[in-house]
Image: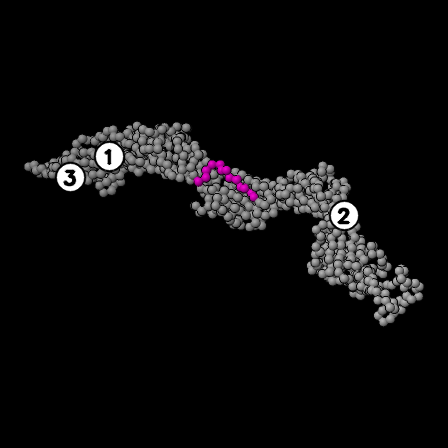
Amino acid sequence: SCPTQGYLQVCDLSPISGLLLANHTVNITLWFTPAVTIIGPLNATFVLEAFSFVPKPIPSGITVYGYFYPELGLPADLNPSGTVALRGNATVTSRAPGFRLTYKLRTTGSSVGGEYIAVNRTKIEGSLWGNTQDAPAAAKECAPPQSGWMIRCDLRSLGYFARNTDFLLYVWFVPSTAIVGLLDADFFLGGSYIQQARDHPVISLTGYLQVVNATPSIVFPPAGAPILLTFLLSSPAYVPSTGLVITVPSSYMDPSIPVTANGSLCNSTGSLVVCQVGGWPVGTPLVSTTLAFLPNVTTVGPLNAPFTFTAPQFWTTVSEPLVAVIGGLHALTWATPSVPSSGVQVTVRVQLNSTGASHGLERFIVNASLVCGGAGGCRGLFWGASPEQILSMPCTLNTSEYVCNLKDLYRHYLPMPQDLYLFFTPALALIGPQNFSLVLKGEYVFDYAVPVNLTCLAKLTVSHELLPPSYRPNAVLAGTSAVLQVNISSTGITLGGEVIRVYARHISSISWSYNDSRAEAQACAVTSAGSRPSSYFFDCTLQAPFSQVSTSVYMFFSLNSDAQGPLDLVLWPSAQWTEFTQDTPALFAVGSLSLSTVALSPDYLLSGQLVMTALTFIPSGNSSVGDSSALWVHSDSLYGPVLWSLNNDSSLALPCDEYDALYQCITSAVPLHHNVSVTLYLFYLPIPTWVGTFTVQITIEADNFLSLSLNTTVNVIGILNPLAWPVLVQPSYSPH
């Protein structure tokens, strides 16, 4: 034992014999313990002194290694080549999916540099991050070396180890993604002249699967069609025979067709469809798994089905592949009226349903050229959910089409019948069957064009004019011909079958032309006889369509010689898909009265003698019941009433009405017949004082006949009356 003298330890060597003999070697062994706070070179000098000798300093050449105090009071292993076992606190960190290690460190003395923590680089992803506080955001990244198996993190910038002060160290790291199960990693701590310590935290790692849809774009299967959906699975970890299981809620599947995975049937367990795919190795190479299934028939739009992938030692992974099911639409239409005339409003009932509820952008598209949109007071296209138009909404006109947005009334396509209504007036120029289709559109539904059974009737406008010569307005002389100009226009260009059907009486033939030229006229066919005498139907087949520009047709009528009275003319212009139109020109035939004989009796009459005039004439046609006729007699030389009769017997004659010097004899009761002569007798007296000749004007009138006028001359002989004897003669009147 060497006693202490002040600051020195002095060992008395004098008892050792032969210590100072010349050329004699003596081995001296000292035992001592370096101060526990010393770490590194001892820096102690041993001085050998003897009387009458120069002191000999001897460097110790000793390096003192410190060590970490292990937690829980475990004894230190003083072998510098070994390690001290430490126990860190490993927890899951906010740097998901990483971990945090926490160390509270003390060493036998203050460290002198080179403080570090290190780990095998194959056990972690990237770098280590360190901090003396539990603040991962402020942690410092430890730069790994460019080569080697270890990642060494220099801790000197964070502080140093000490004997009496805890050094708190927080280390964050992300375990290698290739490891599943125990991490089995050693974390080494040390420094210059500090015995290395080792921590082997117990960390169990769960692997993760990467699941992607093999089809990079969205799958758009039609409703009711099966889907083949391929998933590509990968994981940085390689664990064979993973026992992979894929599940999906059965509500997304059509139960009528079983789900298969790689050709094998999956099981339905009530609310889930379970597919056992087990036995597939999972590693960095992609593994393909194909599911075949039929989506629920009511699915329209994004499938949003969660496919859950589970395997032992792996996190559960959920994938929602980009599958948008395209729904189908179906519709029926009824147009009322289905055969509208031009300018008539149509209501179209649309009964529609879909394979599932739609998601938006529901709309009807109608070709704008088929809709009357402003002309003639039209209002365009309206739609509604009620057959009452007052509750409808206008559709939007976008250049060449009308768009009816169902969202305006919060309507969607539904897997059940629902009725919607369209209100519009077809374009005025439409004629015939129309290629009218209603296009239904929406998000995630196929466009659906539903035809509307609609046949449009054009409206014809007819006017007429009787061209000269005419004997009076709207009158045509029997046995002659007449020209009737018929003007026809149409709301739309007709498509064939243009014809004018004519019904008429007392007409023997009709021809027509586009010019006022009988030489170019074409004969109209007699199709049938009418119900009235001398009535017929004629069909005049035209050669050009009707259009909005008026077409003039000249019709040449040949009247019967016995024509008399109304012609009962009716015109029915028509063509394919035109509405019924008729024109009734109020034309009538005028007959003639031909004078046969005129007889006066006596030829010369004495003053005061009754004159009888017999008129015989022949009518060209027949009078009708209710027709009126009369004889008009005019003369200033008549005296007394004028009588008429059918017989040469004045006692049976009927008086005529007198209007000053004009007499009207009503003969309406006398029927007129074609080519049957009629004789009327007139009886009248000249003025008693008249001597000589005078003229009587006689006119025969009858409805629908030209009047017959004639003048008769009457000779009156005066009488000389004797007044006294010798004879004196006084004339009755001065001779003319």
Say which residue label 3 marks: 689
Which dot, 3 or 1, sits closer to the camera?
A: 1
Question: Of circles 2 and 1, which is in front?
Answer: 2
Task: Specify whether 160 is left or right of 366.
Answer: right
Are the residues tagged 3 and 2 within 8 Å (C-beta)?
A: no
Q: Quadrant of the C terminus?
A: top left
The image position of residue 200, as x and y in percent, is 80, 53
Dot 2: element: loop
Residue at disc 3, secondary structure: loop
Q: Amino acid at mark 3?
A: Thr
Q: Position of residue 85 (x, y in %)?
A: 82, 56
- Provide the residue span drawn in magenta: 429-441
Q: Which residue is mark 2?
A: 180
Quadrant in the rendering for residue 153: bottom right
Answer with left or right where residue 359 lies relative to residue 640: right
Residue farthest toward the front in the current orientation of the protein: 22
Q: Is residue 423 magenta?
A: no
User: Is 203 placed left or right of 232 in the picture?
Assistant: right
The residue labelled by disc 1 is 709
In depth, the one of 362 and 668 nearer the eye is 362
Amino acid tagged 1: Ser
Residue 435 in magenta stretch: yes
